[in-house]
Image (spheres, rainbow, N blue to C red):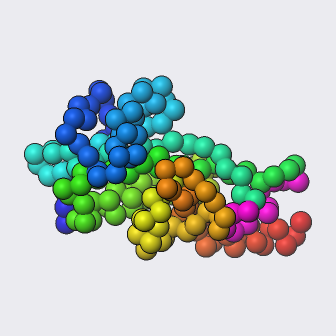
Amino acid sequence: MIKLEISQLDKEPDFNGFTCGVDSIDRKVKRSYFPHVLRQAKTFKIELGERKNIAGYYQISICTIKTDNSNIEFGDYGDYGEGEPEYTAMKMEFLAIDERLQQKGIGTEVLRSAVREAKELGKKWPIRVFLIDALVGKTEWYKNRGFQLFSEKQEMEYGTVRMFFDLMDADEKEKVAAYTEKI
C-alpha cells in the first residue's frame, strides 16, 4: 500500500514541472491557489512517502444542483412543493495525479478518501451527492468506483461528462421512501 499524505495548501505551490498529462486539468491546477485563498474552493496536495514528493493535487468546492433530468434517485422529492428540486453537492473540481505516478492506485485512494469524507460531512450537513466532471475517456474508471452519469443527455466543456456518487446510504433512502408514501 502506498503511503499518501493529503493536506490543504498552506502557501502557493511551485507548480513548475508538474503535469498530469492533460492540458485542461494542468491549467486548472496552476490556477487553483486563488480560489483556495478566496474560500471558493479548497485545494489539496497529495504527497507520497517519507520524502513527501508531490504526487498530485485536487480541489473541492460546494455547489447546488438541480436534479431534473438527472439520474439521482428521489430527485422528485427534494422540492418541498416549491419548484425544481435542488441539492447541495460536494464537487471535485479536478483530480490531477503526476503522469509519472499514474496507474499505481493513487487516484483511486484519493477519490475514496474524498468520498469517505463527504459521507461523514453529509451526516452533519445537507450534502447529498459528490460530483465530478470526468474526462469522457475516464467515465468507465469512475463507474468502476461507484460513480454514475448525472444525466444521459449532457454536454460539458473540455470534453467532460458530469458524474455523481450518491452519498445517501440504503437506510436513508428507505426512510425517504417510507416518508414519501405517507405524504
- Residue 119, compared with residue 25, is above or below; it is below
Locate residue 63: give its quadrant.
Answer: top right
Q: Position of residue 36 (x, y in %)?
A: 42, 31
Q: Main secondary structure of the magenta part?
A: loop
Q: Residue at x 45, y 58 (%)?
A: 135
Q: Position of residue 101 (x, y in %)?
A: 20, 57
Is 158 magenta? The answer is: no
Q: Is residue 122 visible?
A: no
Q: Residue at x 59, y 50 (%)?
A: 89
Image quadrant containing the C terminus: bottom right
Q: Residue furthest left?
A: 51
Q: Nearer the viewer, residue 113 or 45?
A: 45
Q: Nearer the viewer, residue 167 or 133?
A: 133
Left or right? Give the position of 171 relative to 113: right
Q: Residue at x 51, y 67 (%)?
A: 147
Q: Position of residue 7 (x, y in %)?
A: 31, 41
Left or right? Give the position of 39 relative to 78: left
Q: Position of residue 173 (x, y in %)?
A: 67, 70
- Residue 94, compared with residue 34, is above or below; it is below
Locate residue 73: give its quadrant.
Answer: bottom right
Image quadrant containing the N terminus: bottom left
Q: Is residue 66 visible?
A: yes
Q: Residue at x 49, y 50 (%)?
A: 158
Query: Over which residues does the magenta segment extend?
Result: 69-81
